[in-house]
């Protein structure tokens, strides 16, 4: 009988999701991985002890829910759902395709999968379930260089906060929600950029998994970003919208 905790990582083929999936497997979890690149998923499973199942899932597709349930069935259950499937662009031209793809992936796709996992845990109260989602410090203020991205991360963060309150409204005791707010992490999402204070993805993954094991509710990775967010929040709107950020 497998007594290992069971994790599903959505968006496991690159970036933070990839590093977290590997680290969970190293720490004794049985990990199911999902993403859009099947060859990458197959390779990860073949090469990584602890990665025991995969499913090709596009979070923007209505069929993603069926894929999620197939993966949970392969796993024999789930204790942790980690959602790291997101995109973003600097888009001062407001290219409509980029804006709408960002919203489709980061808002609709996230809510589609996270909502389904919430309902799953609500129906399986014998399971101590955890839902963890990558939002961003970009949630703090509207960023003129990346309108849809910063707005989508505010949506994500507020959605998770709402789910936390929903557990209180419904008296649900077995669901823990974690909002993870990294800064600039050196992943393919910002590859080729000159963003300052870029963090190493493996170090970020270690901090994330440490926080997940403590059931932290909110994580802002790195003390420098905690200070940055603190000061951002203090800037009045009238001043902020005149800043060229």
Image (cartoon, rainbow, N blue to C red):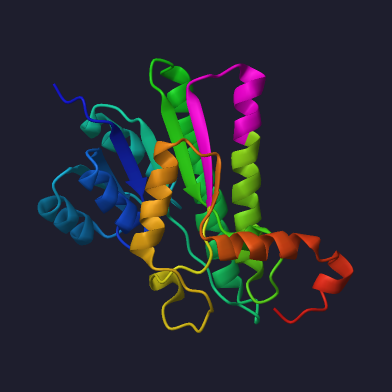
> In front here: 60 or 90?
90
Q: Is residue 209 above or below residue 183?
A: above
Residue 236, by quadrant, is: bottom right
> In front here: 197 or 30?
197
Extent of the magenta region = 163-180
Q: Is residue 168 above or below residue 69?
A: above
Q: Position of residue 192 (x, y in %)?
A: 43, 83
Task: Give the residue at x 11% y 55%.
Answer: 47
Residue 92, by quadrant, is: bottom right
> In front here: 210 or 245?
210
**Quadrant housing the C terminus:** bottom right
Task: Give the residue at x 25% y 52%.
Answer: 22
* Mark count: 0
Instruction: Report the residue that reaches farthest toward the right.
Output: 238
Instruction: Report the residue that reaches farthest toward the left.
Output: 46
Q: Is residue 30 above or below residue 169?
A: below
Q: Is residue 233 magenta?
A: no
């Amino acid at each position: 009988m497998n007594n290992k905790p069971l994790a599903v990582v959505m968006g496991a083929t690159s970036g933070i999701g990839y590093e977290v999936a590997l680290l969970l497997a190293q720490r004794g979890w049985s990990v199911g991985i999902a993403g859009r690149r099947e060859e990458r998923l197959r390779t990860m499973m073949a090469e990584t002890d602890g990665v025991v199942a995969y499913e090709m899932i596009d979070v923007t597709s209505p069929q993603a829910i069926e894929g999620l349930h197939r993966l949970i069935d392969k796993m024999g259950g789930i204790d942790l759902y980690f959602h790291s499937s997101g995109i973003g662009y600097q888009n001062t031209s407001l290219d409509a395709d980029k804006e709408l793809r960002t919203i489709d992936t980061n808002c609709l796709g996230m809510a589609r999968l996270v909502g389904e996992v919430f309902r799953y845990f609500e129906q399986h109260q014998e399971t101590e379930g955890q839902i963890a989602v990558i939002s961003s410090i970009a949630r703090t203020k509207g960023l003129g260089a990346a309108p849809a991205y910063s707005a989508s991360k505010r949506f994500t963060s507020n959605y998770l906060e709402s789910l936390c309150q929903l557990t209180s409204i419904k008296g649900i005791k077995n669901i823990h929600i974690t909002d993870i707010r990294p800064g600039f992490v050196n992943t393919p999402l910002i590859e080729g950029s000159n963003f300052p204070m870029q963090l190493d993805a493996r170090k970020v993954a270690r901090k994330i998994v440490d926080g997940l094991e403590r059931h932290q509710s909110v994580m802002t990775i790195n003390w420098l970003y905690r200070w940055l967010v603190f000061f951002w929040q203090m800037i009045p709107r009238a001043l902020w919208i005149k800043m060229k950020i």
